Image (spheres, rainbow, N blue to C red):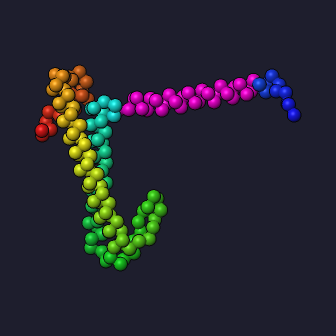
Amino acid sequence: MGEEVTPQQRAVLEQFDQKRSKKQKEAKGRKASRLTGCARTSPAGELEFLEREMTQRSVALEEHKRVLQQMSGLDASRRALQNVAGVLVPRTVGDATAELQTRVQVISSQLSDLASQHKAKADALRAFMAEHNLRITADPQFSAVQRDLASAPS
């Protein structure tokens, strides 16, 4: 029952273990760098993240509104194909319109939530900078953020 492991087999097993542990360490390093190197760790990075999210939501909102506008003149019982996760699903215009209106409401509420979060973060950053008499002038990215904060309504 007890099979002997030859030195050659032992060497192969050791190489396999070394490669596996090296890959695990690299994966942990990538995960840690994603968490610590994230642009959201700084207040300015959080503002940029919120701005990107707001931009994405506003583009989606405009697209949905444009589709609703195109479908407004059509008969509600007319057959339509809707793209759901890359698959065309047969629906009626009335069903698709109702779903799109619901999505527009959801996206609008998400957009207003993101705008309020952005305003709160910007106010907090502005207050912190004023409290500690901070001015950022060396980095053009941060001076643009500071300029945006100064021009934002209080």
Q: For residue 24: magenta?
A: yes
Q: Position of residue 13 (x, y in %)?
A: 73, 28
Does the magenta stretch mainly form a helix, a strand or a loop? helix
Relative to 133, residue 100 above or below? below
Q: Which residues are magenta?
A: 11-39
Relative to 130, residue 70 above or below? below
Q: Residue at x 21, y 39 (%)?
A: 120
Q: Residue at x 26, y 54 (%)?
A: 109
The answer to whether residue 75 is visible is yes
Q: For residue 79: magenta?
A: no
Q: Is residue 72 left or right of residue 132?
A: right
* Residue closest to the eye, 29 or 76: 29
Q: Is residue 37 left or right of residue 121?
A: right
Picture quarter containing residue 19? top right
> Quick one: quadrant of the N terminus?
top right
Q: Residue lying furthest right in this view?
A: 1
Q: Is residue 89 left or right of residue 22?
A: left
Q: Position of residue 65 (x, y in %)?
A: 27, 61
The answer to whether residue 59 is visible is no
